Amino acid sequence: MNANLRLNALRAFEAAARHKSFSAAAEELHVTPAAVGQLVRTLEEWLGAPLFERASSGRIRLEPTELAERALPDIRAGFDRLTLGMERLREGGAKGMLTVTVSPAFAAKWLLPRIDRFQSRWPELDLRLDTSLKPVDFVAQRVDVGVRYGAGLWPGLEAEKLMEEEIYPVCSPLLWQSGRLRNPEDLLREILIHDRSMEAHRGFPSWQAWLARASVPAEVPARGLHINNSAAVLQAAVEGQGIALARSVMARDDLAAGRLIRLFPGVHFVSPLAYFLVYRPECASLPRINAFRDWMREEVAPG
């Protein structure tokens, strides 16, 4: 087997083992599932050993053999180093394509209103935003850097804390002027807007947690408006559809513009979660990633 075919076969094997699917591996590698299967079989013949378990019928089950499992970390590390080497050859400075993954809400409420300052500073960088709440494979999807909200632990990624945030109720100026909201207990008689975007994440602040901090012992009413996008939660509050439990990073611009009013500022509740800049450790020194990281640090710096 020549070196080029060997490299292609290793890529096909690694992708199939990671996805546990020839079809998904084929989609990633831009070939057919049959081509992936043939490359894997060619590699097995060259090695003289199976790489995937076989059922009694002889059909492949996409579970790597013990031998393959032991080899996969080294194969993946080799591809990572090869990718990094190619990036270093391609880049002499901060130029080319920079792919950034962020949530749709963070893009809408924080990043996009500021991104022109980054583009003005680095005009040779073409920016591609990937806005998704789903887990992103930085290698397969060729992502350079991301901003994630959580506790700071994402396997295989370096996480640098950018911003902590406070949680507080907000409403439209018109609702505030009604005079119905004098004490935290008054919230229980209003329509509460619930952010469901990360409700499965342990520690994500809820209305019940904020009310407990405000010494309101009652249960949150079952009625309300439930939305799975933090930006839409704030927009609903802007339009007077209820009272939102805002995340300060997301609500900052709406408060500054007077579109929202913060309620009960004497109650302080800091979220146990925070915003982190994430990237693969082996790519930390790439110029385009350094450019974005330095810019983000400046944007979030106090004052």
Image (cartoon, rainbow, N blue to C red):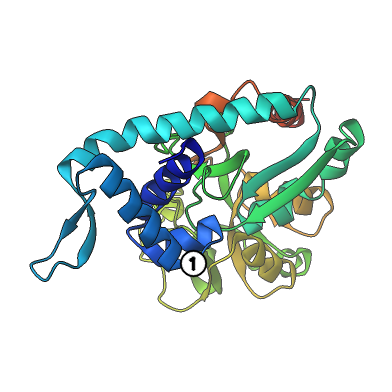
Quadrant including the N terminus: top left
Residue at (50, 76) in percent of width and height: 224
Q: Residues within 10 Å of mark 1 (few under 14, many from 20)?
A: some
Q: Is residue 285 left or right of residue 124?
A: left
Report x, y in % for residue 151: 43, 38
Q: Is residue 51 left or right of residue 236?
A: left
Residue 301 visible: no
Report x, y in % for residue 168: 58, 50
The kind of residue on which mark 1 rests is Thr
Place residue 36 in its image quadrant. Answer: bottom left
Q: Is residue 135 above or below residue 87?
A: below
The residue that label 1 is drawn on is 32
Q: Is residue 153 left or right of residue 28?
A: left
Residue at (38, 46) in percent of width and height: 14
Q: Secondary structure at mark 1?
A: loop
Seen as rendered, the residue at the extreme left is: 56
